[in-house]
Image (tube, coloured by chain):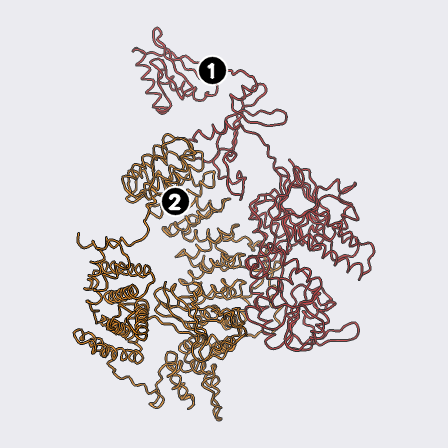
Chain colours: A orange, B red
Amino acid sequence: EDAPRPAKRLQLVRRGKTVDQNEFTAASLNTDDPETLLPALADLHNAIPLTTEIQNQGVFDEVMNIGQRNKSHKVLAQVIHTSCSLSQCDPCDPKMQDRVIHLALSLVTSTKFIVLVRSLEAIGNLCPTEVGSVQSSITHTLLTHTTHQDNRVRTAAFNSLLLIQDKGVLIPSEAYDSACVALSDDYQSVREAALLIIKVVADTDPERLLPIAASDDHMRLVDHAFSQLCSVVHDISVRVRTQAAALLGTLNAVSEKFLQQTWDKKLISNMRRKRSAHERARAMVSSGEWSTGKRWADDTPKEQVAAESVSIISTGSCGAFVHGLEDEFLEVRNATLDSICALALNNAQFANHSLDFLVDMFNDEIEEVRLKAIQVLQQVAGLVTLRADQLEEILHALRDSSLDIRECLHTFLATTILSTISSVKLCVNALLENLRRYPQDRRSIHRCLRRVGMNHPTLVQALVAELLVIHPYFDGVEPSVQDPEYICKLILVLNAAVKCTTILPLLEQHTLRHYAYLRDTMPQLVPVLKLGEEWQPSRVPVSTNTLQFLKESVSRVGRLERSSTQLRMTVYQTVYSDLIKLADIDPSLSAASHFAASYTECLLLFGKILATRNWLTPSSLSMQQTGALKANVDRLLKTTFRLRHAFTNLSPVEEASIRNLRVRTLALQLVYVVHGSTGSALGLCDNFLEHTEALHRYLTDEGLSADSFLEGVFDELSQLEEPRPGAVARILQPLLLTHNIPPVPPVLHHPVQVHMCSAEIIEPQSDSETIHKLSAGLVVGVPLDAEITHIPDPSTLRVRVCYPDHCTQLVVPPRSHLRQVGEGTYRLLTTVLLSAQVSWSEACHLKNNGRPARDLCWNIG
Amino acid sequence: MPEIKVTPLGAGQDVGRSCILVTIGGKNIMLDCGMHMGYNDERRFPDFSYITEGPLTDYLDCIIISHFHLDHCGALPFMTEMVGYSGPIYMTHPTKALCPVLLEDMRKVAVERKGETNFFTSSMIKDCMKKVITVSLHETVQVDKELEIKAYYAGHVLGAAMFHIRVGAQSLVYTGDYNMTPDRHLGAAWIDKCRPDLLISESTYATTIRDSKRCRERDLLKKVHDCVDRGGKVLIPVFALGRVQELCILLDTYWDRMNLKVPIYFTMGLAETANKYYRMFITWTNQKIRRTFVHRNMFDFKHVKPFDKSYMENPGPMVVFATPGMLHAGLSLAIFKKWAHNSNNMVIMPGYCVQGTVGHKILNGAKKIDFENRTSVEVNLSVEYMSFSAHADAKGIMQLVRHCEPHNVLLVHGENVKMEFLTQKIMQEFNINCYKPANGETALISVPTNMEAEVSLPLLKHTLATPTPTLAPPNPATIAPTTTTTTTTTSLTTPNTTTTPTGGHEGVDNTHTGLKKQKVLHGVLIMKNSSLRVVGVNEAWGELGVSPHQLRFTERIEVDHGGPVPTLTSALHTVLAGKLGGAMVQAVNEYQLSVADTVCVNIHEDDPGKTILVSWTHQDEALGGKLLDIIRTTYAK
């Protein structure tokens, strides 16, 4: 009785009554007129789930009664539909379900399709999982209705079979046969449903042997199902084709033979056998010939083929994927690509076969498909070996203007294994050209080259002299270390040098100096090499005790509880500045230090505010004092807000203390505003109560105890009749003054694990010389590329644009422009629109150099 | 048996001059009215005098034009204006828009360049176009009371359509030229499962199975890109309509994708006029263009600019589309002469070249070309060949046949040898007849007759309501007539699709699938005033004023039985129930049993034994006989 009391009273605060919309009056069913019954039943159906079990039972009986006395087929259908839903309400009542099943089974002789459809749906939904007569009669009924005259009934029968299969009921083997027959049904909905049946049967019973017509042989069911699905790829309807193409990838354990056939397409030209472009390319590479430049005739048809040996109608799985990729609609092509990916991941040979076709898809007219093709390629990269001609085709796509395609390709190149020196050279040259064409790809190309270097140390070794222009006798010009291409080459070579130490003696002195520079500036891209002392950057690993320092600082704050205000303030100030420094020194503790520093700052501010004499009667304060007080309150609000939202991965205790601090701050603000200004504090009060309540719930959920301040707040609030700002403030004022803040931020449990949200703006660079011209009153778009780490909820992200005239704008980036890179890490690629006020009468230049003109910031609510 | 008569006046075992005369259900229809581009004499037009002695308008019910290529519509003004025809002509909107453009161009070439005299004039083309009625895709147009036509998308060129023609129960599909694989500006041909009696299909590539288009496109793009990257100029000789729009889109989007700045030029004139129409008929293009046109119409090329002769001299890389396509004259040849000597440059031949043209020579690797005026040009530039054809290949044709499930196929618009192969394949794969008449030869395709009979609704409902005992495969129609003077009682097998409403539009006629459960219907077929009706027996009696007569057989069996009658009755009941099944036999009272509600068995007290009297109607002959046997063997004296 005592514990939940405050919570109960606190609920007073909630505005707006929750209306129970599920109320339903059974009285409206008391009629025989179909015209009024139908809407009533439909209403009832919407009202499900009803609130109580008793009510359920009553309504259910009533509905079943209608079923008995009414003969209108529409009403009957609705009765089954509704009673089926009713009987499935929580808690399930097997008796009710039995009654519905019997009613439905008795109605399957109906001639009206709607009654039939509803009955089949109902028995599908309610089919018991235990084997028994009910179950067998249900499966039998469903099976017989798969050949019903009405397409809607056939569809419903197949769908219900699918439903009962989902429940774990073994569907009879005839279901598979009738599904295969239904693949040539006239109606696409039937074909769609049949496809799914085939898929689930193939999943549950893949090894069953099916006889092959007109021979004694047998084939495995999963193979049969696969070729059935393949034949549907030629279907007349887009929806069915899409589904079939998508399902192809979901079948596991299909025989090798059937998989290989999916790429089969024999070309003939005027009855002569012809080689496809893929075969020609393959033959060219294996023969070691080079293109003569006049290749128009090399696709001339070869030998004559016998008319009998040509099969134009594809049987089985022949050419299914070839066809799927050539489909008119992107939905089908996309689904096919997905399937290819799924199958290729399980089968290296299939992956190698698919390579040519995937490369072809780079040339699709729709970007979505091109991107998907590259993504598939990227996923199978580990399984395939590229031929030089294929690599050339792939590298061609690096010229694409779509950033996604290029970056995807970079990832692909980073993972794939190249076999020859010439292909590595080809690859590096293409990447360098890419860099020239699209300088914004710099980071991605760096990462890619790093991996290429790591993956092919010996191949890179052969290229070192050529790449770095090293001559055996002559000294070359020392390249500028700012040259982006040179940096790329260095990254490649240096990463290769880790595994192939013979590269090191090849390098010249200036190259080694550049290594030291790069190692310092981009440590994540340049590895440590086994070189003499002089080339190693002077960063010696020293045990720094930063963790201990952090702990000590925090505990220093804790020890001060009983000290004088003056001393406390001084210590807070020192600790605060110490921690900020610490954050700079040790990146691994940066987040925790920031957290502790912010917390200390809050303590400091609280102290300052409460120490201000007469802070509750601002009218008596001097101008300067008022200003300082206001600034402190604002700063406090801002800091607690940051604490509350910028840090993640905190323990519940830490989280609770932060929330406590926030509540306290809001309380302070409320008291301050109520006393100090004349405006309404209604909104503030609501906000405070909302936070208090949330905190209370949080504490109860996590099983934590509230501190003395909060206990006081909860107690007092629960005795309050109506939460008016004045009254709340009156309660809070003494509480604030009497209860001190728990001074130890409990950050010490796992300081390394604390994450702080941060954003790095990659584009536009702060030192960029690009000038964006904008005319007054019009907008100009500035591309923005930023990486945001440890963001708990990306929807709260805002871009802040600061203009030279000190006005700022917050821009909500579109959701689609954010892409997830890793856990809690996002990349924002968007165009920020800048606009100048109309009052600027002349066009002016907004320079982008020097200080960052715009940054990312947090704003919630 | 009724027949569909098909006579090709052109395009029978031949390519060019498509013109097919069809007689279906008493209607005469002309499919396409094309000219042959290879001839300059009267052979270029179909022989219209062959059709009929009298005026054409009286004989032909309508003309249908599938698309705007001249070998499908070139003879139209000649026929309507010079031979004389004023009946309806059907074509799609884009065809009507582009057809006069091409006709006018051809007329100009024929009259102004070649100086022909007996040729139709511009005003004739205009008058001819006034007779055209346009149809939209999937719109059913009622030509007259019985004849209706419906257009389906065919790919091939803008506005190309396949036509489904129906007269009563007979139907045929004429494909015109079609393409089953989508290209950069058009989608693939599509037809629903309309199950026509006859499919008339083109067969240009009957013996070819083509590689994917993407390879070829990629090849082309890469070559062009490499050439302009090294500063070369690319010349692509094209004809003004069709492929050039496809290539322009291909290059334009590629330029966009790759961020290229090299100019692409396009010669104005006819092609520009055509582009205008391409921009308008967005609904006839492929998925990509339809999806993006709100954003930007793909035919509003971003990078393609009009060409001016002076640009030929400009330095730096460029890509030029120039007419005509075979490098035999005009601008494309002029540009070729200018650029041929530089090995950095390239010429791409996107199609077939006739022997004797410059295009043909360079494709065969000629290093030096001599011209009439004793000038010659060194050919140093690289020559590429790309084949972009918009006809269905063998696989595509088979796929179309599979999709529309015809009962017969007739091939036109192809070479005889190639057709022979495909004919065999179609007969083999689909087990249907396939024809390939030559020009002037008539193919007769017999179609099954469907007799339509009206079935009374109560009878159908009654039949549907009685449950079928088993789910055994349907019996073939059995007819067991018992004759009265004017009517026949028949048992008809009816597909029960007739009464249930069927949703969707994919197909209505389901009798051929053999999937449907069939039921035996007991009724009376009444033939009166050339109408057929099936009604219930009682209805028929009432309607015809016939009083029903019943034919009953009665047999008496004398039985030795000592006990009282009820004992015998119950004994008999047990016996019969054991033999026939309990549900069949019912005891009416102590003296009477009833079997299957119709046969009654009475038992009488008789001296010295008892008599069993069995009585059955004519319909229950079999049951009665069996019953009699049972009783006789059980109680035989």
Q: Residues within 10 Å of mark 1 (few under 14, many from 20)?
A: few
For the view shown, which residue lies furthest in the front direction?
Answer: A620
Q: Name the foreground residue: B55 vs A22.
A: A22
Of marks 2 and 1, the one in the foreground: 2
Q: Quadrant of the C terminus of chain B?
A: top left
Give the image location of residue A116, x and y in percent: 42, 37
Q: Quadrant of residue B342?
A: bottom right
Circle 1 residue: B552
What residue do we see at 21% from left, 72% from top?
A744
Circle 2 residue: A161
Label 1 resides on the chain identified as B
Q: Residues within 10 Å of mark 2 (few under 14, many from 20)?
A: many
Give the image location of residue A305, x and y in percent: 59, 58
Question: Where residue B391 is drawn, which disc sits there?
Answer: none
Q: CA distance from mark 2 to mark 1?
A: 51 Å
Q: Name the foreground residue: B559 vs A555.
A: A555
SS at badge 1? strand
Residue A107 seen anywhere in this rendered image of the structure: yes
Q: Name the foreground residue: A653 vs A434.
A: A653
For the view shown, which residue lies furthest in the top direction?
Answer: B607
In the image, what residue type sits under mark 2? Leu
